[in-house]
Image (spheres, grey):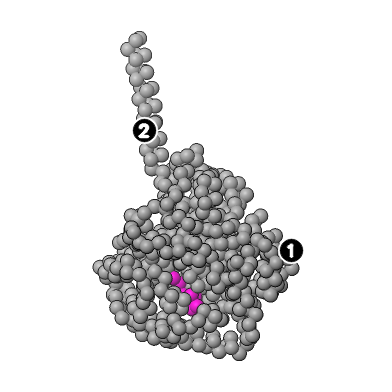
């Protein structure tokens, strides 16, 4: 009897030891939210390591931990947890919808969502004022199973208020600061989207780009920033700078995840005529571009006459990256200068931004007309100027309104002769004499530039071309600290590689970006943000 009891006790003890070891292995396998991928989210949900509610609550806890310091998140969606619960129930009964099932994301505050959250571009002028419905791209992400976690802070009015403004500042959310250096400039205008993604306050975030507003903050915060072809995804119900040029795009930590987001976001929208030009009868599976790293047959051009002024550490890393791409089979066209580069560099901002300034004046007035409620009775930029001057939270005149004021200049109108004249000049300067002409002349698939070289990046934005940034490197220890007029550190440690393609060439663009990412692993091997939230999925149970 004694021996039988002893054996029974032994077997029970062994059972519990095995259970604990198994549980420990499962918990050890739960990835950190700082670098979790969509594949890891999918396997974690499928294997019941965690639930959508666990994931959502973990991100909410991380926001609570650090947002008072970083000011990246403007508003929390009060429906987020109930959405997560519904997706958990669906997972149990029907399985996952796809790669984005249960994935919590933030949405930049100039993108309209169909819930109780505001859409203000960071200004109290639009509190309580929204059009009906929501941006068709957000609706697609909901259908794919994403959890809309909240709204991200930004540069007010998507950086189209001030000439000398502070990137990442809004009256509603305060000053966003970068993830890698204390009190650093986060860049913008998708500042909060970038910082929140870098810190793991969300899985990914939506940004918008008129010119540089996704890729620039992605660079500073060591992310993949992806601005697709204008019209590949819906841009309706976005508080506009230029409806012709404004593009919604994902900010992620890997190229493959950006491709998977694009799969869910791309497609025609009845509410955005630009999407009616999509040339595909059936959309490609963009994630397949990340299946391998063989770049044989891909032609990459380097417009070196646009690289002047690039810091030495950036150029050193860039040249190494080009060698790596060559080693992967890419054909490198080393001298593909842009003929209009000097002409573009010499243009004052008032001239280079003239077209989108006139479009901002027209498009914002059109947006005001769509508002179901308009508490401040805004109908024009002139009304917005008056509101900004007389509202203390807007901090005028400490924070200027130079870009607003330019809309009032004579001839700044989409019907003016000057507008038509400048449009013709831009079509030549960016097209035949610009980046498109170079791509045609040298039969390039992709143009590669270090960091955010102004001429090719600005040209690509104006033409609606796809752009993606991938982390390239970090400034060395001891780099001189440089601060801007707002006392924010100007030079953060991260810089990126930027790839530009022709319209609707996302497959080859993603292929090149993914191949470079796999060859370099910069984000994986680089420094961590200076403050990392402590909450992990292991704590969410």
At label 2, counting other C-alpha atoms closer than 10 Å, the crowd grade (few under 14, some 14-19, many 20 or more) is few
Q: Residues within 10 Å of mark 1 (few under 14, many from 20)?
A: few
Image quadrant in which the N terminus is located? top left
Residue topped by disc 2? 21
Considering only vertical position in the picture, is 2 above or below 194?
above
Name the spot of residue 504 as percent of width and height, x first.
Answer: 45, 73
Question: SS class of the residue under badge 2?
Answer: helix
Image quadrant of residue 341?
A: bottom left
Q: What residue is drawn where x is 44% and y is 45%?
A: 44
The secondary element bearing badge 1 is classed as loop
Task: Name the front one of labels 1 and 2.
Answer: 1
Examine the image and state in which quarter residue 271 appears. Answer: bottom right
Q: Is residue 131 left or right of residue 319?
A: right
Classify residue 72 as left or right of residue 371.
Answer: left
Q: Kindly identify the residue that appears in the image at 37 percent across and 38 percent down.
A: 25
- Residue 432 percent coordinates (x, y): 43, 87
Residue 191 image point, x, y percent: 51, 61
Measured in 3D between alpha carbons, the distance from the residue under mark 1 to the one under mark 2, in whole angstroms, is: 60 Å
Picture disc at residue 375: 1
- Residue numbers of the magenta segment: 461-467
Q: Nearer the viewer, residue 48 or 482?
A: 482
Residue 157 is covered by the magenta coloring: no
Residue 512 seen in the current view: no
The spot of residue 68 in percent (x, y) is 55, 50
Q: Quadrant of residue 14?
A: top left
Q: Earlier in the sequence, mark 1 or mark 2?
A: 2
Find out whether residue 465 is within the magenta segment.
yes
* Residue 430, placed above or below residue 481: below
Left-right relation of 517 to 410: left
């Amino acid at each position: 009897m004694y021996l039988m009891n002893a054996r029974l006790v032994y077997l029970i003890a062994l059972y519990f030891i095995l259970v604990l070891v198994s549980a420990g292995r499962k918990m050890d396998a739960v990835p950190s939210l700082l670098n979790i991928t969509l594949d890891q989210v999918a396997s974690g949900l499928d294997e019941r390591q965690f639930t959508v509610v666990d994931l959502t609550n973990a991100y909410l806890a991380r926001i609570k931990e650090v947002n008072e310091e970083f000011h990246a998140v403007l508003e929390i969606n009060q429906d987020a947890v109930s959405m997560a619960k519904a997706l958990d129930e669906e997972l149990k009964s029907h399985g996952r919808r796809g790669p984005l099932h249960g994935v919590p994301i933030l949405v930049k505050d100039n993108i309209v969502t169909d819930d109780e959250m505001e859409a203000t571009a960071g200004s109290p002028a639009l509190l309580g004022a929204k059009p009906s419905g929501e941006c068709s791209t957000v609706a697609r992400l909901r259908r794919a199973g994403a959890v809309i976690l909240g709204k991200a802070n930004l540069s007010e009015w998507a950086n189209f208020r001030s000439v000398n403004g502070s990137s990442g500042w809004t009256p509603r959310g305060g000053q966003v600061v970068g993830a890698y250096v204390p009190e650093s400039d986060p860049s913008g205008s998708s500042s909060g989207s970038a910082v929140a993604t870098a810190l793991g306050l969300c899985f990914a975030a939506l940004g918008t780009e008129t010119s540089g507003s996704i890729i620039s903050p992605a660079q500073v915060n060591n992310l993949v920033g992806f601005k697709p072809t204008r019209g590949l995804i819906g841009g309706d119900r976005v508080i506009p700078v230029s409806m012709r040029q404004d593009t919604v795009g994902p900010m992620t930590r890997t190229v493959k995840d950006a491709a998977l987001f694009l799969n869910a976001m791309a497609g025609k929208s009845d509410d955005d005529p630009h999407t009616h030009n999509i040339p595909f009868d059936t959309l490609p599976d963009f994630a397949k571009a990340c299946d391998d790293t063989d770049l044989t047959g891909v032609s990459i051009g380097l417009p070196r006459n646009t690289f002047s002024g690039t810091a030495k550490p950036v150029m050193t890393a860039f040249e190494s990256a080009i060698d790596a791409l060559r080693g992967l089979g890419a054909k490198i066209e080393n001298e593909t200068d842009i003929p209009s580069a000097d002409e573009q560099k010499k243009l004052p901002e008032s001239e280079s931004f003239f077209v989108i300034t006139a479009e901002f004046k027209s498009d914002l007035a059109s947006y005001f007309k769509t508002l179901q409620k308009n508490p401040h009775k805004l109908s024009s930029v002139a009304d917005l100027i008056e509101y900004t001057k007389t509202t203390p939270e807007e901090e005028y005149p400490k924070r200027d309104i130079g870009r607003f004021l330019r809309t009032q200049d004579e001839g700044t109108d989409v019907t003016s002769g000057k507008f038509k004249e400048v449009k013709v000049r831009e079509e030549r300067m960016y097209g035949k004499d610009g980046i498109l002409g170079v791509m045609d002349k040298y039969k390039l698939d992709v143009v590669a530039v270090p960091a955010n070289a102004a001429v090719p990046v600005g040209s690509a934005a104006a033409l609606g071309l796809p752009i993606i940034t991938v982390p390239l490197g970090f400034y060395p220890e001891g780099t001189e600290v440089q601060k801007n007029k707002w006392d924010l550190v100007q030079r953060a440690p991260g810089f990126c590689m930027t790839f530009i393609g022709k319209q609707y060439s996302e497959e080859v663009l993603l292929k090149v970006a993914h191949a470079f990412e796999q060859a370099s692993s910069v984000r994986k091997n680089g420094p961590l943000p200076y403050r990392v939230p402590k909450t992990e999925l292991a704590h969410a149970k």
